[in-house]
């Protein structure tokens, strides 16, 4: 009976690992798709920042960037089973929503709300909680203060800056320098996504290792 109980518990662990691995793989692929869109937005912004870009060309670029931003929002609202995987512990609500004013804001729970946990072996818990606001927010950029004449570090988020970029691109007079300054935000967001993707890859490797250990334990218990 003791052996049967241990085997049954190991089956639960393996099922948890399978579910976590599937979600982490979906997370990894979603992050990769977001990074591709960020890279395209970066190229389009570089093109728009060129002094030869006309207001008409800038407006066309704004339309394409908006499509890319909407794609990123869709990827942040991806679901595994019934869970929005970038909404934090509260997975029943989509991570991001766009209001009537055009602002794309985070709707999920914050990182401080806790983590989602699964037990994957005896005394081992797998924690995962990639929130959209952590991924796309908290971006630090350098801004020049005209009053003090000094540069200051301010915290912003990707979607707010993309709305400002859209306004710059749709203006009757193009401020190429202001457009160029948005590249710092775009690059920072790309770096965060890339780093997060690397962390997810490490988590999947941990799951694979634990799964192999559990399989060996199952074999030993079955033989016993």
Image (tube, helix red, strand yellow):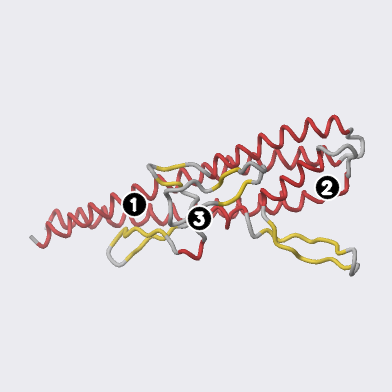
Do the numbered discs 3 and 2 sit on residues whose CB atoms are within 8 Å? Answer: no
Q: Is 7 situated left or right of 178 in this image?
A: left
Give the percent coordinates (x, y) of residue 168.
82, 43
Q: On the image, numbered disc 3 is attached to which residue?
A: 130
Do the numbered discs 1 and 2 sit on residues whose CB atoms are within 8 Å? Answer: no
Location of residue 122 with respect to 36 vertically, above or below: below
Q: Nearer the viewer, residue 140 or 223?
A: 140
> Which residue sits furthest front?
100
Give the percent coordinates (x, y) of residue 181.
81, 51
Q: Residues within 10 Å of mark 1 (few under 14, many from 20)?
A: many
Q: How many marks?
A: 3
Measure how far apart labels 1 and 2 are at the Cα level.
45 Å
Location of residue 111 with respect to 28 vertically, above or below: below
Q: Residue at x 84, y 30 (%)?
A: 57
Q: On the image, numbered disc 2 is attached to which residue?
A: 180
Quadrant where the C terminus sits is: bottom left
Q: On the image, numbered disc 1 is attached to which residue?
A: 17
Q: Is 112 situated left or right of 175 in this image?
A: left
Q: Secondary structure at mark 2?
A: helix
Q: Nearer the observer, disc 1 or disc 2?
A: 2
């Amino acid at each position: 009976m003791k052996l049967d109980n241990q085997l049954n518990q190991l089956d639960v662990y393996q099922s948890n690992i399978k579910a976590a691995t599937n979600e982490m793989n979906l997370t990894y692929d979603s992050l990769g798709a977001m990074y591709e869109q960020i890279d395209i937005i970066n190229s389009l912004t570089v093109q728009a920042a060129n002094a030869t870009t006309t207001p008409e060309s800038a407006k066309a670029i704004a339309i394409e960037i908006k499509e890319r931003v909407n794609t990123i929002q869709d990827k942040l609202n991806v679901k595994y089973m019934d869970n929005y995987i970038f909404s934090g512990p509260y997975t029943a609500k989509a991570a991001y929503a766009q209001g009537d004013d055009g602002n794309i804001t985070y709707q999920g729970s914050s990182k401080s709300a806790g983590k989602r946990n699964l037990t994957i072996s005896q005394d081992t818990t797998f924690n995962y909680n990639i929130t959209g606001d952590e991924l796309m927010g908290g971006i630090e950029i350098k801004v020049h203060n005209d009053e003090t004449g000094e540069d200051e570090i301010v915290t912003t988020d990707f979607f707010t800056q993309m709305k400002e970029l859209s306004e710059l691109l749709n203006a009757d007079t193009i401020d190429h320098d202001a457009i160029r300054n948005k590249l710092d935000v775009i690059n920072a967001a790309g770096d965060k996504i890339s780093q997060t993707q690397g962390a997810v890859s490490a988590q999947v490797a941990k799951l694979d290792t634990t799964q192999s250990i559990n399989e060996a334990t199952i074999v030993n218990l079955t033989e016993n």
